[in-house]
Image (cartoon, rainbow, N blue to C red):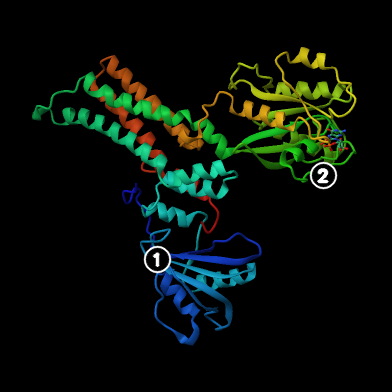
Amino acid sequence: MNKGLWYNPPMQNDTIAAIATPPGVGGVGVIRVSGQDAFAIVLPLFRRPRGKQTLPASHTLTFGHIIDPQTQEILDEVLVAFMYAPHTYTREPVVEIQGHGGPLVLRRILHAVLASGARMADPGEFTMRAFMNGRLDLAQAEAVMDLIESETEAGQRLAMQQLRGHLSEQVEQVRHTVLGVIARIEASIDFPEDDIPTPTAPDLTPGIDAALVAVRSLLAGAEQGRLYRQGLRTAIIGRPNVGKSSILNALLRVERAIVTPIAGTTRDTVEEVANLRGIPLHLIDTAGITHTDDPVERIGVQRSRAAAESADVVLLVFDSSEPLAELDQRISDEVEAMGFGVLAADEEASAHKRPLLLVLNKSDREQHIERADLQRRWPNATLVETSTVTETGLQPLEEALALVALAGRNLHSESVLVTSTRHQEALRQAEEHLRAAQGSIEQQLPLDFVSIDLRAAYDALGEITGETASDDLLDKIFHEFCIGK
Ligand code: GDP
C-alpha cells in the first residue's frame, strides 16, 4: 500500500524519546527511543552482565542495567530491545527499554536518555515519523489512534481493518480510476500536435461512473462506521428520583453512579460506556433539569442541560408510580425545545429531529401515571416500561435504543470501511466533484472544466490517505495522539 514518501518531511535528524506506557504504576514501563542516534544514545547507558559489548541481535530482548551517565548510579534493571531500521514502527532505528513500571524510575531513565542527546517526543511523533517515512499512510496512522481508543470489539475490528490498509486500498483504487480519466483528457489538451483524438463522452463517463459508484458505496457504510467509532451519546433525563441512575446502572450492569433515595443527589453528570451490540453507548446520567437555588445543584443542572444538548438520543424517564408532575412537563418541554422528538415507526432518524425514548420506570409499583396524557402529547411514542428492581423491561429498552440508533442506517458491518467524520467529509467532496464532472460532460463544456473537477475529486480522496493533506491538517491529527505513540 505504501509508496514511499508522500509528504516532504522536515529534517528528522534528531532522535526522540518518550515514556510509551501510561502514567501511573504498572508491572513494566517502556521508554521508546527513535532516530538515527538511538543506539548511540542508549548503548553507553546500558550495562550488561560480564561487561558484554557486542550489539545484540535486532528485535531481541537483552538483560542489563541502565545507569545514570553522570553518577554511574544504577537506575533500574531492564530488558532492552534494539531494533534496526527499517523494520521498526518508525522505520528509523528504535530502542525500547523495559523498566519497572514506577513513574519515578521511568522518568529517571528518560532523563538519562534525554541528557545523552535525545529530544522529548511530541504527542504522536513516533506515528508521525512512521507516516513521513512511508510506513503508514494517514488513514492507517489515524487507525492506530482508533485502535487504542476503541471501546467495543466491533470498533476494534474496524480500526484494525483500517490499519491494515483496507480503506486506503479502496481509496487508492478510486484515485487510480480518476487519474486514468484525467490522463486521457490532459494528453489531448497538452499534446494537440500528436494527433491524440479528443476524448468524447463515451470515453470518459465509464471511468467517472465507476469512481462515483465506489465513492458512494464507501459513503453508504460511513454513518454506521462513525457510530461504531464514536458511539452514541445517550442522555438519561428526568426529574429527581425517577430512577435515572438506577437505569444507567442496569444498562451498565455495574454499580457506578451513587443511587440514593434523596432527591437531587446526582448533582453532576456521570458518563459511562455500555456496549450496545458493538456500538459504544455513552450513557450520561444527568441531574434533573430543574430550577434550583442551590449553587452546587445549579452547576449540575447546567451541565445536564449541556449534556442533553450534545446527546444523540434522550431517554426521558418518568416514575410511573406517581401522577405526572408539573416538573415532568417542564422537563419534557425543555427536551422538545432542544429538538428531540419521538420518531414515528416508519420514520427515519432525520437531521431535524433527534430521537427521544420515553421510559416509564418503577413498573413494579402500583401505577398512577396518566398514560393517556403522554400518548396525547406523543402519539407515536413507544412507552418502554421498566423496573430496575425486578429488572424487567431492560431488554426491550436496549432493543428500542438499538432501533433508534440504527434507524436509517445501512446495517452490514462487513461493508463498513469508513468510520471517521474526516474521511466521510472528504468522500462527500469527492462525490460532489465527480458529479460536477459528469454534469460538465453532459453539458458539453470544454474538457478543461471536466479536468478541473476530476483533479478536485482526486485531491479530496488524497486527503484520506494523506497524499494531499496540508501540514496544518497533519499537525492537528497527530497532536490528538498521546505522548509516546
Ligand atoms: P434518579 O434521581 O432519577 O437518578 O433516581 P435513582 O436512580 O437515584 O432512584 C431513586 C430511588 O428510586 C432509589 O431509591 C431507587 O432505589 C428507586 N428506584 C429506582 N428504580 C426503581 C424501580 O424500578 N422500582 C422501584 N420500586 N424503585 C426504584
Position of 353 compared to 335: left or right?
A: left
Quick one: 130 or 56, which is closer to the camera? 56
Q: Label 1, on which residue?
A: 93
Give percent across and percent down for residue 24.
65, 62
Please state the horizontal and vertical placement of residue 11, each as a whole percent of the image.
37, 58
Work out whether 49 lies above or below 215. below
Which quarter of the frame holds ligand 1?
Answer: top right
**Please, what secondary structure does the residue beneath circle 2 have?**
loop
| Alpha carbon separation for disc pair 1 and 2 | 50 Å
Do the numbered discs 1 and 2 sit on residues whose CB atoms are within 8 Å? no
> Is the CB–ligand 1 distance for label 2 below 8 Å?
yes
Q: Residue at x 82, y 40 (%)?
A: 266
Residue at 85% over, 17% down: 370
Question: Mark 2 belongs to which amino acid?
Answer: Ile
Q: Residues within 10 Å of mark 1 (few under 14, many from 20)?
A: many
Q: In the rendered structure, find residue 258 and report the number of the disc placed on it.
A: 2
Left or right, 16 with reference to 394: left
Residue 411 seen in the current view:
yes
